[in-house]
Amino acid sequence: MSTSDLKNRTNQILLHIICCAAFLSLPILMPTHGSDSLRNILQNGHTIQNTLGYGLTLVFFYANYYYFIPQYYFSKRYGWFTLFMVLSFALITIVPNLIPLHPTSHGLHQQKFVDHVTHNLLRFMIVFFISLLLKIRQQLKEVKKEKLDAELSYLKARINPHFLFNTLNTIYSLSVEKSDQAPAAVVELSSMIRYVLDETNKDFVSLDKELNYIDNYIKLQQARFGNTADIVYSVSGNTAGKQIAPLLLIAFIENAFRHGINPEEDSEINIRINITGNQLQLFVHNKKVFVQNVNEEKTGIGIANAKNRLAKLYRGKHLLTINDHENDFSVNLVLELP
């Protein structure tokens, strides 16, 4: 954590402490005690009730902000969320009323309780909406930041400079050899660049276009490594009319080529994509080999970034299993397409 971040965090904590202290002081500072001394005010049963009520309301604010809203409201579990709101209000209303007061007539005590409930309801609703609005505002800021981070990652990963450099070298070598593969490699690379520039600024793209990008990527890698690597790639199922987040699957495939190809070793990569109804399954497996420039991973999207995108775009609609063993690495992703 940088000095600036630490300073901002410290300022936020101090601001919370000051606001909490001011909020809890309201029952004492409110001009309802006449000319009573501070000692009498602090010993007054109504003051104790109100202070306890304010304290419980403050606890509710943080519980709602940090737990109930993220866990139940944002995940659309509205039934449970409503139940917890009702229970919280009941707790805030009933517990302070257990504090004994001086004996009063039954009618006056009943009126006091009605006033107590009305005041608590008003305070509860204000705190509820404040915590909800603040959490929604924070969520929007986080989504906006993550979108900007993702866009920045795209700018770095769309045309991976290492991949582009190696591909151009491959095309040059094929041209020198006057290989029939050279024209096809140029077409495949240009198609990839066109897709990245024209399509990947969208939230979702045609699955056919995404798979065409992957197909071109693998063909260029096969042209680069030739017979030095055993690369198996297959796609099955109906892709028509289906959409997917752009450059999502390629992160796992790039990782396999980055860590699973060494011309001097026995290299194997197996990639299978299967579409059944609205469900897509990606399976990627590679043998681990010695790779000199491991830091190249930093220039790509990376699996960590892909996980974040899955959590945001396919929350509750995907299952990702990663097996990282001593000699091999595999990814199994099951995705519910929109």
Image (cartoon, rainbow, N blue to C red):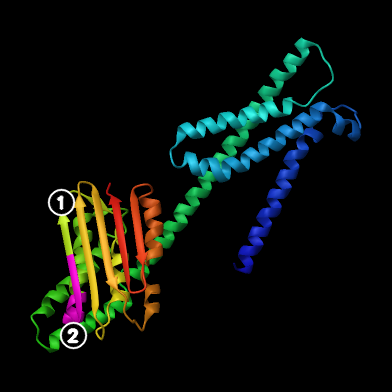
The x and y percentages for residue 214 are 22, 65
Q: Which mark is residue 172?
A: 2
* Residue 245 visible to the viewer: no
State which region is magenta. 221-233
Looking at the picture, tell me which residue is in the foreground, 266 or 24. Answer: 266
- The residue where tag 1 is placed is 238
Instruction: Label the magenta part by its dominant secondary structure.
Output: helix
Q: Magenta span has 291? A: no
Please determine whether, in this image, residue 152 is positioned above or below residue 93.
below
Instruction: Say what amino acid the circle numbered 1 marks.
Output: Asn
Image point 23% across, 60% down: which residue? 210
Please determine whether, in this image, residue 267 is positioned above or below residue 311.
below
Quarter-of-image position of residue 116: top right
Q: Are marks 1 and 2 in contact (CB under 8 Å)?
A: no
The x and y percentages for residue 104 are 82, 14
Locate residue 173 relative to residue 38 in the image: left or right: left
